[in-house]
Image (cartoon, helix red, strand yellow):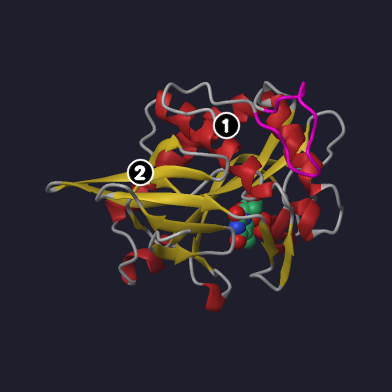
């Protein structure tokens, strides 16, 4: 029986009303989509892995002082989050040429960029999330100039931290996408990291083999998406390999964050 109020359903997640005002429950689905949902599949176990991987990354970012919406993981597929007003901008950080940048500028996939590059995309499925500039963002009032500065600073801190985290487990962080929200505390507003960080929204390449350990396996019909996400979870130390796998459903070890409850 499920009487929770559904606040929003996206392609890979559902947001439900939370237990207290100002909170929501973020539920990770098994749906994989690409090319603005032209391509769709159900990959059993993906939601469980993304919930756990995103929990670990948000908790670690919180520890280094990056403000996030994350409160705690509730169960295999859900986490408690603070309710924020999502800024309708996807912030992409790139370290290595790949995907749409490689195509747009005719760069060789895999070539290092002269420095990390930030791009903005306007979140609008009907328009296919078009790339926009700071001029568009301020002119149309999607975010204020100071908010853009704050998002860029946070995105670069997140990038520095994640590049190191992944390099330590033999993975190159090629690029990733993050979203931010406005969190109101009385009259004060803070920009916080929202949404998720998982192999759905990063490009992760094995340092030695260049194997793709991310959603490009689905976008490019390479197969083995679940195995790739499991490999990321295994290297991050959150996949329990001593317990038998039940079908395609991965078994995760319990959280090592104080608030994360085992299930
Ligand atoms: P792109 O090269 O296709 O523009 O993607 C850049 C990064 O953003 C890549 O890590 C994948 C991620 N991304 C999303 O998370 N959602 C999207 O809708 C798109 C297009 C990309």
Q: Is there any visible trace of residue 179 in the rendered image?
A: no
Residue name at image x 48 percent, y 29 percent:
261
Structural crowding at the residue carrying mark 1, measured as other residues with C-alpha within 10 Å and reported as few (<14), some (14–19) or many (≥20): some
The C terminus sits in image quarter: top right
- Label tally: 2
Q: Which mark is residue 240?
A: none
Please give the residue where the numbered disc 2 appears in the rendered image.
192
- Residue 252 occupies quadrant: top right
- Residue 199 occupies quadrant: top right
Q: Residue furthest bottom?
A: 126
Residue name at image x 39 percent, y 33 percent:
66
Q: Ligand 1: which quarter?
A: bottom right
The location of residue 108, given as percent across then percent down, is: 80, 50
Taking depth in this image into account, of 31 and 249 the one nearest to the observer is 249
Q: Is residue 157 left or right of residue 111?
A: left
Residue name at image x 78 percent, y 40 percent:
228
Q: Is residue 245 left or right of residue 4?
A: right
- Could you give the CA–CA distance between mark 2 and mark 1, rounded to whole angstroms? 17 Å
Q: Is there any visible trace of residue 245 in the rendered image?
A: yes
Badge 2 residue CB within 8 Å of ligand 1: no
Please give the residue where the numbered disc 1 appears in the rendered image.
162
The residues colored magenta run 239-252
The location of residue 34, given as percent across then percent down, is: 69, 64
| Element marked by disc 2 | strand
Magenta-drawn stretch contains 248: yes
């Amino acid at each position: 029986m499920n009487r929770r109020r559904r606040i929003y359903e996206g392609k890979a997640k559902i947001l439900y009303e939370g237990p207290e005002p100002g909170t929501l429950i973020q539920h990770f689905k098994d749906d994989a989509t690409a090319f603005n949902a032209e391509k769709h599949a159900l990959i059993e176990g993906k939601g469980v892995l993304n919930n756990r991987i995103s929990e670990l990354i948000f908790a670690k970012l919180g520890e280094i002082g990056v403000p996030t919406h994350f409160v705690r993981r509730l169960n295999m597929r859900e986490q408690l989050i603070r309710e924020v007003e999502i800024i309708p901008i996807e912030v992409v950080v790139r370290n290595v040429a790949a995907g749409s940048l490689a195509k747009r500028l005719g760069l060789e996939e895999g070539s290092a960029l002269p420095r990390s590059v930030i791009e903005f995309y306007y979140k609008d499925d009907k328009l296919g999330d078009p790339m926009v500039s700071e001029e568009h963002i301020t002119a149309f009032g999607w975010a204020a100039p100071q908010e853009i500065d704050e998002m860029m600073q946070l995105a670069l801190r997140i990038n520095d931290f994640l590049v190191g985290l992944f390099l330590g487990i033999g993975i190159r962080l090629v690029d990733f996408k993050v979203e931010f929200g406005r969190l109101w505390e009385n009259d004060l507003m803070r920009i916080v990291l929202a949404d998720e960080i998982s192999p759905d929204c990063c490009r992760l390449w094995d340092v030695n083999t260049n194997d793709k350990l991310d959603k490009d396996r689905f976008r490019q019909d390479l197969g083995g998406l679940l195995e790739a996400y499991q490999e990321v979870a295994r290297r991050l130390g959150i996949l329990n390999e001593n317990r038998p796998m039940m079908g395609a459903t991965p078994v995760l070890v319990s959280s090592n964050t104080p608030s994360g409850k085992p299930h």
